[in-house]
Amino acid sequence: MKPVTQHTRWLTLFGTIVTQFALGSVYTWSLFNSSLSDKLNEPVSQVAFSFGLLSLGLAISSSVAGKLQERFGVKRVTMASGVLLGLGFFLTAHSGSLMMLWLSAGILVGLADGAGYLLTLSNCVKWFPERKGLISAFSIGSYGLGSLGFKFIDSHLLASVGLEKTFIIWGAIVLVMIVFGATLMTDAPNQVVKTSDGVAANDFTLAESMRKPQYWMLAVMFLTACMSGLYVIGVAKDIAQGMVHLDVLTAANAVTVISIANLSGRLVLGILSDKIARIRVITIGQVISLIGMAALLFAPLNAMTFFAAIACVAFNFGGTITVFPSLVSEFFGLNNLAKNYGVIYLGFGIGSICGSLIASLFGGFYVTFCVIFALLILSLALSTTIRQPKAELYQHAHA
């Protein structure tokens, strides 16, 4: 039996990495804004709104993917997400109006991407309970690399075959990769819940988890990291030109700096989380992010300090989304991870909208940075005081 399981879990890991790489390709979205804006004759801001919808769809479907896995298994759900993603890009290629673009590139692509993302990640982590941090880093790292890899593929296609064909070819590539990855995956077996002295180790259902204050403390920390990361990632180029007065070429480097910092956060904090307490890893990330936000708010900004500041924020964002699946499993058990993490993961979608919302309501970066700064201080207070939830129910019964 032993070699089969070893073989199965390594195949699942490989399939997950291929799938995550393809799913991460949606993060090349900003490459298409201006071409789509010309095609549809609509302002860029309206076209770019489809990415906000995509992030929201991604978060929503991530939170229900656990339910789908119970019914259909990881293979089928992942294949379906690949087919829908391909279809989403195909429809985007043929969309002639803003509404159609929002439905296809925003909602359909987002729902498809999210269904595959969280499910394959938590399934893979369950296969490797002894190396949760490393496996999360591999899986989420390849999601990040996907956006980097497809940046070159999509830029090349855009230049050589034009907008419509790029979407069709891109859709075909991701469909093949995801369906192939899915065929290698197997559902992870449920973990045996350890009991000591009649008290079950942490293994909470979603309903039980949501009754614990720790659940909401984790949710606030996650929301803060996502909001700061996504907002800064989304407007980095504009901040560089507006606040720091860098020229267009230098400002464009912000995107590269963020990609590198985001990826290093995923690898460094992910691997570190197998060595020291995971919640401490989150604290380290928060401190780094606070330094970055403080620099953006209070330091004299030049190219050097600006790039260092956004790198700090992106590093924490990448690290947090890597460490969180394992952290949630540590607090609330591995068996219901997809569901328990799914609801917290909604913070990703909410965070992606909150930053832009505050900025548009109060006009500009500064107020948004102040709000994020305050939230980071709150999150830091939470991460330093939070304690593991206890399975009290069993203790009373036992006593």
Image (tube, grey):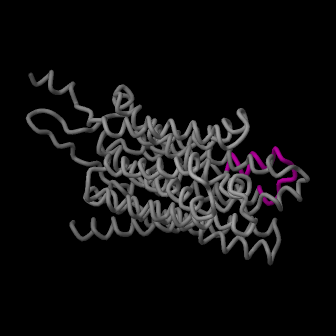
Q: Does the magenta segment cover residue 360?
A: no
x 71%, y 33%: residue: 362
Q: Is residue 106 magenta?
A: yes
Asked if residue 309 is positioned above or below residue 304 in the image, the reply reads above
Q: Which picture quadrant has residue 250?
A: bottom right
Quarter of the rendering containing residue 270: bottom left
Residue sitting at 76 percent across and 61 percent down? Answer: 32
Front residue of 34/398: it is 34
Residue at 52%, 40% in the rendered image? 373
Q: Which residues are magenta?
A: 92-108
Which quadrant, please, contains the N terminus?
bottom left
Q: Is residue 263 visible?
A: yes
**x and y percent of residue 213 in the render?**
35, 28
Please state if 306 lies on the left or on the right of 261 as rendered: right
Horizontally, residue 283 falls left or right of residue 116, namely: left
Q: Is residue 168 above or below residue 118?
A: below
The answer to which quarter of the image holds residue 198 is top left
Judge from the rendering whether residue 36 lies leftward or rightward of residue 394; answer left or right.
Answer: right
Q: Residue 214: x, y in percent?
A: 34, 32
- Quarter of the rendering occupied by the C terminus: top left
Query: In terms of secondary structure, what is the magenta stretch mainly?
Result: helix
Q: Position of residue 31 (x, y in %)?
A: 73, 63
- Nearest the eye: 397 or 325: 325
Q: Residue at x 23, y 31 (%)?
A: 390
